[in-house]
Image: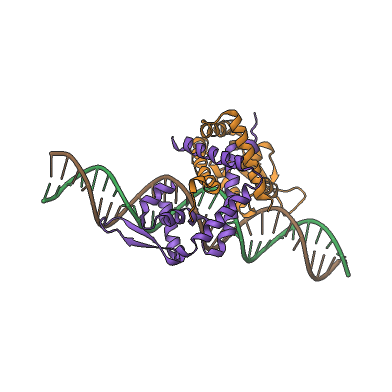
Chain colours: A purple, B orange, C green, D brown
Amino acid sequence: MSFDPSSSAGYLVNHMARLFFEELRNHIQPLGIVPGQFPALLALWEQDGQTQKALVEKLDVEQATMANTLNRMERDGLVLRKDHPTDGRAKIICLTEKARSVRNEAYAAAAEVNDIALAELSSEERELFVDLMQRTIRALQSR
Amino acid sequence: MSFDPSSSAGYLVNHMARLFFEELRNHIQPLGIVPGQFPALLALWEQDGQTQKALVEKLDVEQATMANTLNRMERDGLVLRKDHPTDGRAKIICLTEKARSVRNEAYAAAAEVNDIALAELSSEERELFVDLMQRTIRALQSR
DNA sequence: CCAGATTGCATTTCTTGCTATTCATACCTA
DNA sequence: TAGGTATGAATAGCAAGAAATGCAATCTGG
């Protein structure tokens, strides 16, 4: 019995994720942000002032992961935690001017990373690739 | 200007990788191994007694990452570091009986995870998916 | 209205990736 | 053959994921 990593989806996904992560790191470093902060920033650029719980649900990460990511973002001057107006337990996550100011450059950087990664694929293949990933994610989530 | 995460390849790859990782964790936990050890085990099951440097090149991780992974594997009784017969700097990584004994179960677990993840894809789509990932990896590596 | 259950978040500890640094051995060249 | 450079590996420290635990605020059923 044997097993070929180079044609195993899980193995390839892991490898691909590490490569994307590092490529994104190189592109956004000048902006003062790092790859782990990117998903949270995307959600907050889309809608500022969400609770931590809302971010946890949207990004599908654990609450502890989100709390630590927000700690680093606060340390880096990207967000502020403000008191929730009606719920004393909750906090409202608000972007700083610094975070707002790099939004368009960050979008461009992310698009460029995707372009680099998918350079050898036709536009039909790119669409199909995205569709296959979305379906794979749904299959894994529904467990 | 806006940016849609749910159709961004990089975003989806990251999400998918986390889901695969956790699914694999659940499946191999009974075997006494964890997902981070899987790639090294695959390489060693294929060919026991490789140097750390050989593993680093095959798995495309940094040398320090490999050293730390091997530390945990040694701690967990999966491998032994033996002296290289001719190169005093190098070490030979050898599997223990414990690691050898779970090989087939681990192969089955990995195959099962792939099946779960790709459950909604036809066999043609699965092949295409693997091909798209391989081409994406090559594009990112050639930089 | 209040006691218990639930909820939102913080903290700690572990894993797995990375860089940077250090150390010892090996190799080469003058 | 001595000195300088290469190379293989270990270690320390940071990032970003997770689980487990604890706390304080909120809700809810009697």
Residue B68, can we see it?
Answer: no
For this rendering, which residue is in front, A98 or B23? Answer: A98
Which quadrant holds residue B79?
A: top right
Q: Position of residue A54 (x, y in %)?
A: 37, 50
Q: Position of residue C13 (x, y in %)?
A: 44, 53
Which quadrant holds residue C5?
A: top left
- Residue at x 56% of width, y 64% of height: A30
Label count reads 0
In the rendered image, the residue lying farthest to the front is B1
Examine the rendered structure and indicate whether residue B22 appears above or below residue A82.
above
In the picture, which quadrant includes the C terminus of chain A?
top left
Q: Position of residue A2 (x, y in %)?
A: 65, 31
For this rendering, which residue is in front, B125 or C18? Answer: B125
- Horizontal arrangement in the rendering, residue C26 relative to residue B111 (left or right): right
- Residue at x 42% of width, y 56% of height: A44
For this rendering, which residue is in front, D18 or B16? Answer: B16
Q: Position of residue A136 (x, y in %)?
A: 51, 37
Examine the rendered structure and indicate whether residue B127 appears above or below residue C3.
above
- Residue at x 45% of width, y 61% of height: A73
In the picture, which quadrant includes the N terminus of chain A?
top right
Residue A114, can we see it?
Answer: yes
- Residue at x 66% of width, y 40% of height: B44
- Horizontal arrangement in the rendering, residue A47 relative to residue B67 (left or right): left
- Horizontal arrangement in the rendering, residue A104 relative to residue B46 (left or right): left
